[in-house]
Image (spheres, rainbow, N blue to C red):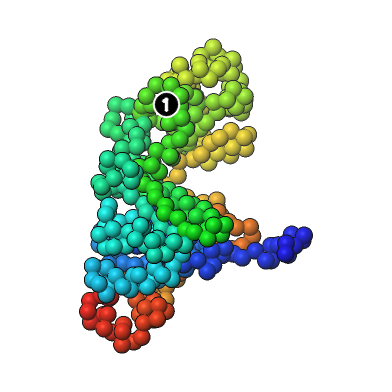
Amino acid sequence: MNSDHPEERRAARPATPLAGVRVLDLGQYIAGPGAAMALGELGASVIKIEPVAGDQARHIGRYGESMIRAYSRGKRSIALNLKSEAGRAVAWRLIADSDVVIQNLRPGAVESLGLGPAAVRERFPRLIYLSISGFASQGPSRDRPGYDIAAQAESGLMSVTGEPDRLPQKVGVPVIDAAAAHLGAQAVLAALYGREKTGLGETLQTSLLEVAVHLQATTWSDYLGGAPEPMRIGDGQPNNAPAAEVVPTRDGHIVLSAYADDHWARFCRVVGREALARDPRFCTNALRVEHRGELRAVLRECLSGFTSDECVVLLGGNQIVVGAVRSYRQVLEGADLQQSGMLVEAVGADGIRYRALGLPYSLGDAPRATPPAAPACGADTDRVLADAGYGAAEIAALRQAGAVA
């Protein structure tokens, strides 16, 4: 029965809305494990099935280990040889006890093991099965392996990133992998909600290519509406000015957007150059785009004597969009991140501790989830098997047969 009192509703609302949901993570690297971890941070119980040798991310050096720390916190890890009949039998027992299966292995890998979505959901129609591939499942590239960088290249993203007279550039971080993780988790949440109504699960599929195109929706909408082919222009936006302009300051750089006419007039007033708002080169957005080179010279002239922080205080305080270009160290030390609640401490059973990033949103006034540190490969094998009903002798036999490690 719903309460009419907000205080009672707050007290009744759980901080972990997915408590009781069980997720089986067959993924590697970022996209699959990231989707599973997002569900785990919302309260789901996540078991990570790794090959006996471990997630491939464990074998590519320091950055791979950072992937594990970032996207496998709060999970239990079982090292399982899925190429063995006994290993697959274990997987089927774990699947039977799961609500969600997530995988982003190379095309055809789960099907070759007999663990693809069709086979799994035929036996367990309530189960939700998410696959994240490199390319769309219906397209001619469906069998190609795909990493974040391939999706950046083939989605058009790199064609619009960088300077016009330089090579196309990738985004500085694997943003497509990370976005695929969260969009995949979003699809799972929708399917879980749908299952409450129908009693049936769902087969979900997305790809890095589709995610990469989706992230460019505004530019694609412009192009589909008849705009010219978008091109690299470095900083700035092709149809607005000043928009996303990188402006040097006394100690670094800022980005500035003030392309609406009233924002531009406000900028001119704030920097003490009100006449610029009436300058025939700059009095409309179209004219500012046409005279972008001269506009940039004026922006440098107006702002180069200020520090980046002074620009943020001056312009931001007058409701003009501005941001200082900050290094990771500066972001980490800044009050905005420190006070956001996103920084959490991950603590492992073996005493390991490291700082990590939590979910980028909060659920009411509930504290941010703080999952424990990512497990070592196979750290929870015995416990997971025992919870699945295996006795000590059976576990020993599985280990001797090489089915688990």
| Along the viewing direction, whichever of 405 and 324 lies nearer the viewer | 405
Q: Where on the picture, by quarter, is residue 55?
A: bottom left
Residue at the spot 52% in from the left edge and 60% down from the top edge: 199
For the residue marked with disc 1, what is the amino acid? Tyr
x then y, percent, for residue 363: 60, 58
* Quadrant assignment for the C terminus: bottom left
Judge whether residue 61 can be spotted in this image: no
Question: According to the image, label 1 marks what residue?
Answer: 223
x then y, percent, for residue 3: 75, 62
| Along the viewing direction, whichever of 174 and 311 lies nearer the viewer | 174
Q: Secondary structure at mark 1?
A: helix
Q: Where on the picture, by quarter, is residue 362?
A: bottom right
| Along the viewing direction, whichever of 47 and 216 lies nearer the viewer | 47
Residue at the spot 33% in from the left edge and 30% down from the top edge: 163
Give the residue furthest to the bottom.
393
Label 1 Cα crowd, 10 Å radius (few <14 / some 14-19 / many 20+): few
x then y, percent, for residue 316: 59, 37
* Quadrant assignment for the N terminus: bottom right
Residue at the spot 45% in from the left edge and 44% down from the top edge: 326
x then y, percent, for residue 51: 27, 67
Give the residue furthest to the top.
280
Q: Where on the picture, by quarter, is residue 29?
A: bottom left
Give above or below for 82 relative to 149.
below
Residue at the spot 57% in from the left edge and 63% down from the top edge: 17
